[in-house]
Image: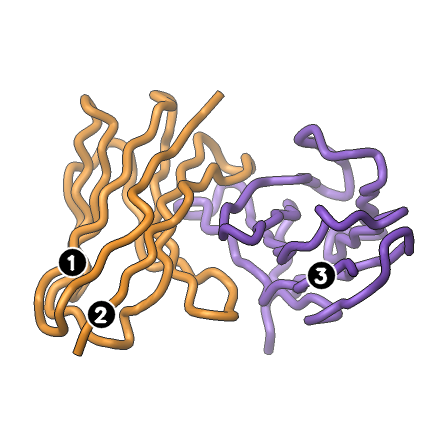
Amino acid sequence: DTAVSQTPKYLVTQMGNDKSIKCEQNLGHDTMYWYKQDSKKFLKIMFSYNNKELIINETVPNRFSPKSPDKAHLNLHINSLELGDSAVYFCASSQPGLAYNEQFFGPGTRLTVL
Amino acid sequence: GEDVEQSLFLSVREGDSSVINCTYTDSSSTYLYWYKQEPGAGLQLLTYIFSNMDMKQDQRLTVLLNKKDKHLSLRIADTQTGDSAIYFCAESDSGNTPLVFGKGTRLSVIA
């Protein structure tokens, strides 16, 4: 059973379009995250949700809107896609209070904006 | 804000030891981690260390932490070609805060 899954794995789209990436975790964790990995492999946090509530938004443009319908899901909607949005987006989850705060990562969604 | 620094590249011969270094700035870091990313794949937690520890050994992996200098290292003994990957150092200071990652060290193992 996959712990953290993301769909789609690859997404190729035109500039200006709107797209969504979905994430689901079956670990029962309370906290979920979106990270962005750029073409140089640099990884940075975008958003963090705890029990469906947004707790961290790291100066991400308003075109990015996360939504957490329940604590097992954290989706990312992106409006008016730009070339610079091309990256790999990783979802992760963790459970505060558990040993060493391990974050479990999804396989990533490679977004290419043409 | 917090910052985590790593050298970007390391090349070693198969069978040698690899040492990947990392420095961080956040003195409130509680947990320090090493993640591995193979080409086209996600991130896999390799090992971690609490900030009150100096060393942790796990099979071929040895983590050393110098808290005074805020320096973390990962030593891989008997490096194999399958160890070729990008290794990320990361830190967090509490149970549900996001990880702050270094830029990753690309390890190339030459047969």
Q: Chain of mark 1?
A: B
Residue at 44%, 30% (x, y): give it. B93
| Side of B48 where A42 appears, left or right | right
For label 1, the SS is: strand
Q: Amino acid at mark 1?
A: Ser
Which residue matches tag 3?
A111
Q: Report the residue at 77% width, 67% height from top.
A: A12
Which chain contains the residue that carries disc 2? B
Q: Label 2 neighbourhood size at 10 Å, few (<14), some (14-19), many (20+)?
A: many
Q: How many marks?
A: 3
Amino acid type, residue under disc 3 in the picture: Leu
User: Would you name the residue on which mark 2 appears?
Assistant: B109
- Report whether mark 2 lies on the same chain as mark 1: yes
In the rendered image, residue A21, in percent from the top left (x then y), is placed at: 78, 60
How many C-alpha atoms fall within 10 Å of the one at disc 1: few (<14), some, or many (≥20)? many
Mark 2 vs 1: CB contact within 8 A = yes
Q: Which chain is purple?
A: A
Quarter of the picture containing the C terminus of chain B is: bottom left
Classify residue B110 by image quadrant.
bottom left
For the residues labelled 1 and 3, the Cα–Cα distance comes to 33 Å
Q: Residue at x 64, y 55 (%)?
A: A87
Residue closest to the eye, B90 or A89? A89
Please say if B102 is above or below A90.
Answer: above
Chain containing mark 3: A
Q: Amino acid at mark 2?
A: Val
Q: Are marks 1 and 3 in contact (CB under 8 Å)?
A: no
Give the Cα distance between marks 2 and 1: 9 Å
Q: Which residue is mark 1?
A: B18
Q: Residue B22, position in %: x, y?
A: 28, 39
Going from N to C along the chain, the mark reached first, 2 or 1, is 1
Q: Dot 2: what SS?
A: strand
Label 2 and label 3: CA atoms lie apart by 29 Å
